[in-house]
Image: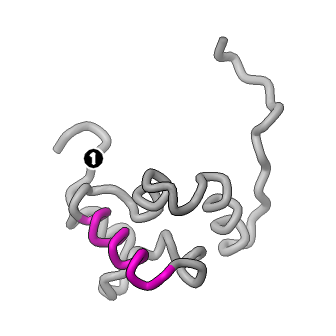
Amino acid sequence: MAFGVRTAAAVFAATDPNGTGRCIEIDCIRSSLAADVAEAAESRAAALGVGADRVLIAAGKVSEEDYLRALTRHIAVAFEPLDGTPHPLP
């Protein structure tokens, strides 16, 4: 296994604890996606060993910020944007 890449089995074990074939990490935006887009993202995620959220973000179907805002609403935690936050990188 390459560094940072999980096998398809590991992805689905982590993201599909109920064995439904769905990636739960996109449940927060699933209602805003066409069914075929969600299914394609889940299939691609399994093939690549990444989460379906990463597939959708990389494909430009959702921005990372929009995804994170939806996720934080879904799990009832506050979203704190980092724009304007000082950081040590040049």
63 vs 90, nearest the viewer = 63
Q: Is residue 22 left or right of residue 48?
A: right
| Image quadrant occupied by the C terminus | top right
Vertical comparison of 23 with 62: above or below: below
Q: Quadrant of residue 19?
A: bottom left
At which x and y percent is residue 31?
Answer: 58, 84
Q: Residue furthest top?
A: 90
Residue located beneath label 1 in the image: 5
At which x and y percent is residue 32?
Answer: 59, 79
Query: Could you say whether the residue bearing mark 1 is in a helix, strand or loop?
Result: loop
Give the magenta-colored segment's residue range: 34-46
At which x and y percent is residue 38?
Answer: 42, 76
Q: Which three-letter amino acid code belongs to the residue tagged 1?
A: Val
Vertical comparison of 34 with 6: above or below: below
Prevalent SS, magenta region:
helix
Q: Is residue 29 left or right of residue 59?
A: right
Vertical comparison of 87 with 6: above or below: above
Q: Specify whether residue 41 is painted magenta.
A: yes
Please state the total of marks drawn on the protein image: 1
Q: Quadrant of residue 4?
A: top left
| Image quadrant occupied by the N terminus | top left
